[in-house]
Structure formats: structure tokens, C-alpha cells
């Protein structure tokens, strides 16, 4: 299975750190955020990783190179302007191939990746498998629910999308051109029970602001 790290975002809320540094290279206790992902992906047996880049993207490719130091092969998907999560994945499909692939947001931190990533086999009718987390304070209403392993747009218990998922390329068959977020495709597919989901209970943090970055650093010291 290949993996993709979404790393093209501008990181507006992490200013001034991101005025001169792309968000995935922001250090967490001295190590770039994206390096934690690469180490964990290599540890579970992933061999190829696609990274989409836009804002200061050359700094990411300069810092990470071809991935040899993690025993990975890194491919870069270049965007002249950020295409958001859905558009970024679509743009990278030629590098990702025809089989399901794992995607993780470049601005989240997890203490470990879900153990089931490399073992999951999407049922023939399913287009994705998403991991949801308990709602953080900045997203108290959540995004989706889970019922009988299926993603629900409305549920009694709502959870937050973690930014981690396995996607079948077919999910993007009728995707619009240009920039769009993955919920544009995920929500209608969920209504048709085409998306599996599970609750991820490991440490997870959306490192979206300087305050959250500092809180995370204190937590994992």
C-alpha cells in the first residue's frame, strides 16, 4: 500500500512560524512534524509515500530528499496553488496508482498510526475507510458519526475526522476540477453506505495553531 501526506497547506494560523517555513517542517520538540509521519509509515511497512507540496514546497523536498534515510521512496506532487485535500489527492492520483492508498494530513500528530492500516481490505462496495477521534475543544460538534462500522453524516454521537483514511481511487472518479475538500465526495458516499469508519483512540492532535503546538510539545516531552 502507498501512502500520501497532505502537505500543501499555507499554515495561516501558525504564523509567524509559517512565514518562512512550510507547515509540515514546523518542529515539534526539535523534529519536523512530517518526519514523525515518515518514521511511523516506514515502521508499519509502507515503502512509497507521495507528498503534495505548494507553499515553500521546495523546502520540503530539500529537507526530505528521496526518502532513503527512512527506507522510503518519496514522490512529490507539485501544485502551483494549493488544491485543498480533495484536489490535492486528485492531482496525485497518477503517482498513487490503482489500488487503495492511505492518506494522513500533514498537520496532525499521532503517537502511533492505526494498527489496522496495512491489514484493511476495503469491501468491494466501499470507497474509503476513515478514522474518527474524540472531539477536540476547537471542534466540539464533530464531523461524522459511526453506525455498524459505516460513516454517518448525522448520528447521536458525533466524532471528528482525524485526517487519516484509506481511499479507493474510484472515490475520485467524478471529482470536480481544481480545489475542493474531501468532504464534498465523502458525505454523499456516506449517505449511500460506501464509507467504513472506526474510532481511533490513540493520542491525536491537530497542530493548527501555535498554542496547540506548544501544548503538544509539553504533552510529549
Image (cartoon, rainbow, N blue to C red):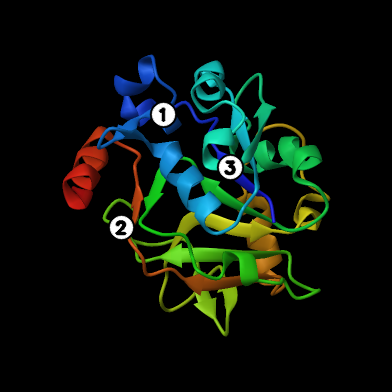
Q: Nearer the viewer, residue 1 or 123?
A: 1
| Element on which disc 2 rests | loop
Report x, y in % for residue 193. Answer: 69, 75
Nearest to N terminus: mark 3 or mark 1: 1
Q: Nearer the viewer, residue 149 or 69?
A: 69
Quadrant housing residue 75: top right
On the question of residue 107 being in view, the answer is no
Residue placed under numbered mark 3 in the picture: 71
Find out whether the residues at labels 3 and 2 contact each other: C-beta distance under 8 Å.
no
Q: Nearer the viewer, residue 83 or 39?
A: 39
Residue placed under numbered mark 1 in the picture: 25
Give the distance between the C-alpha atoms of the residues marked 3 and 2, in whole angstroms. 34 Å
Nearest to N terminus: mark 1 or mark 2: 1
Q: Quadrant of the N terminus?
A: bottom right
From the viewer's perspective, is residue 195 above or below residue 3?
below
Report x, y in % for residue 117. Answer: 58, 65
Residue shown at 77% from the left, 50% from the top? 172
Quadrant housing residue 61: top right
Which is in the foreground here, disc 1 or disc 2?
A: 1
Residue shown at 58% from the left, 34% from the top? 67
> In this rendering, would 205 be left or right of 187?
left
Give the distance between the C-alpha atoms of the residues marked 1 and 2, in whole angstroms. 23 Å
| Element on which disc 3 rests | loop
Give me the disc on residue 136.
2
From the viewer's perspective, is residue 28 above or below residue 41?
above
Give me the disc on residue 8.
none
Report x, y in % for residue 93. Answer: 77, 42
Amino acid at each position: 500500500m502507498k501512502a500520501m501526506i497532505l502537505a500543501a497547506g499555507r499554515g495561516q494560523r501558525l504564523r509567524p512560524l509559517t512565514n518562512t517555513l512550510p507547515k509540515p517542517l514546523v518542529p515539534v520538540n526539535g523534529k519536523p512534524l512530517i518526519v514523525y509521519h515518515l518514521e511511523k509509515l516506514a515502521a508499519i511497512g509502507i515503502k512509497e509515500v507521495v507528498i503534495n507540496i505548494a507553499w515553500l514546497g521546495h523546502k520540503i523536498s530539500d529537507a526530505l530528499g528521496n526518502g532513503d534515510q527512512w527506507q522510503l521512496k518519496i514522490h512529490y506532487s507539485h501544485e502551483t496553488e494549493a488544491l485543498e485535500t480533495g484536489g490535492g489527492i486528485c492531482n496525485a492520483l497518477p503517482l498513487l496508482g490503482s489500488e487503495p492508498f492511505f492518506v494522513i494530513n500533514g498537520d496532525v500528530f499521532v503517537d502511533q498510526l492505526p494498527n489496522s492500516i496495512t491489514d484493511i481490505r476495503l469491501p468491494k462496495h466501499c470507497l474509503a475507510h476513515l478514522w474518527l477521534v474524540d472531539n477536540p475543544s476547537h471542534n466540539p460538534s464533530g464531523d461524522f458519526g459511526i453506525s455498524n462500522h459505516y460513516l454517518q453524516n448525522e448520528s447521536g454521537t458525533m466524532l471528528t475526522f482525524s485526517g487519516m483514511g484509506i481511499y479507493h481511487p474510484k472515490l475520485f472518479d467524478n471529482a470536480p476540477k481544481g480545489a475542493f475538500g474531501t468532504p464534498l465526495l465523502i458525505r454523499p458516499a456516506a449517505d449511500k453506505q460506501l464509507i467504513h469508519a472506526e474510532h481511533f483512540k490513540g493520542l491525536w492532535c491537530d497542530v493548527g495553531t501555535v498554542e496547540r503546538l506548544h501544548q503538544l510539545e509539553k504533552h510529549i516531552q
